[in-house]
Image: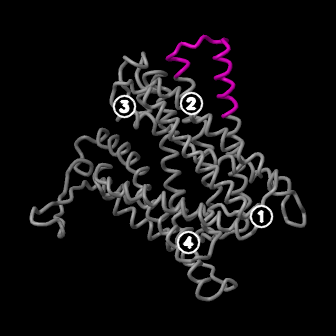
Amino acid sequence: MGWVLGPIALIGCAYITYYTAVLLSDCYRTPDPVHGKRNHTYMDVVRSCLGPRDVVVCGLAQYAILWGTMVGYTITTATSIMAVVRTDCHHHRGHDAACASSGTMYMVVFGLVEVVLSQFPSLEKLTLISVVAAVMSCTYSVVGLFLSAAKVASNHAAHGTLLGVKISAAAGVSASTKTWHSLQALGNIAFAYTYSMLLIEIQDTVKSPPSENVTMKRASFYGIGVTTIFYVSLGCIGYAAFGNAAPGNVLTGFDEPFWLVDVANVAVVIHLVGAYQVFAQPIFACYEKWLAARWPESGFFHHEYAVRLPLAGGGGRAARFTLCKLVVRTAFVAATTVVSLMLPFFNAVLGLLGAIAFWPLTVYFPVTMYIAQARVAPGSRKWVALQALNVGALVVSLLAAVGSVADMVQRLGHVTIFQTQL
């Protein structure tokens, strides 16, 4: 997207996310934003403001992005492990050595690890993993920023062009390729701003006074602001370092110092091991609740088995599970891993996820619920402005989805299924 459109897209998505987060914060309590009834989840807010039909649409969008993120995390983990292997190979055998590797085995191992973690009873049991994941996120982000800045300094100049990759037959960049990649980049940026999906659940933990919406608006301002500053810094410095040859995962563009690159990539893996479960557990809870209600007499869904843990100490602590939990969660993670193996496209998958999530969850529902709760008069200036934002975000999401799918189709002709490459 280049030096012009890239920063504009980042800042534009950040502003839209903040603005709609403000609207969504006012819908936490209904019908009054200060004294109304609490809604504990995003879907509860949709149910209170818009009705049961919209809850189904919201649920489909939420669970689709949760599952899609699990697929994306599986692919990202494999590419990070492959980057570690390649970096070490280049360090010991030279940077011109052929160090190709396939990520299939790494995806399978990652899937097996997640099968084990999926047997934890609830998110509360994963607190330590979540804390470690947050620390790892800061680690690889700072390392990526440092390595990019060091590369810019060593280049003695900033790379990149105003409008991104130039169309050139000699370079193999056609007008359609540039268009698809630019639209996919919009989806990648949108994926970085899926904050609204979790806003209500976060707001539900806020104590009052002051009222929850006031506190949440302030938190959104600082949270999105700091995140955007970091995104813009890393995006711009990374682009200055690599120019139009910038990799989708900036860490894969470095080989030295190999130990620092390895630390960053290992931090990515550790982060995603924990983050995967944060997205998986709500899906498990949803279908297990439905299955248990559908077959209330079945021991497969209700009978608990206990297995004593050998390292649990003298208390004789036991792990409890149902056959449904053991079998269905394992099958679900296995199916997710297989889909990941069939879609070895890091950027395209993230772009598609961003396109799927951004319009419905970040713009459409917050805007529509705010209009309903605040009783914004149809045809008024505010109503027209909100609907224009709604339509504009829909167009951007559709274009990003088209670009991501088109890129996948193009790449399918040049890759082997079940063989992920850097």
Q: Nearer the viewer, mark 2 or mark 4?
A: 4
> Going from the N terminus, do you reach mark 3 or mark 2 first?
2
Q: State whether residue 289 is above or below residue 35.
A: below
Mark earlier in primary sequence (2, 1) = 2
Q: Is residue 386 visible?
A: yes
Instruction: Pick the residue in front: 42 or 305.
Output: 42
Label at residue 261:
4
Image mark for residue 20:
2
Cα–Cα span, label 1 and label 4: 23 Å
Query: Crowding at label 3, few (<14), some or many (≥20) Cα neighbours within 10 Å?
Result: some
Residue 344 lies within the magenta run? no
> Which residue position is annotated with label 3?
40
Q: Quadrant of residue 347?
A: bottom right
Q: Alpha carbon of mark 2 to alpha carbon of mark 4: how far?
A: 37 Å
- Depicted 377 relative to depicted 197: above or below: above
Residue picked out by circle 1: 157
At which x and y percent is residue 312?
A: 17, 65
| 1 or 4: tag closer to the N-terminus | 1
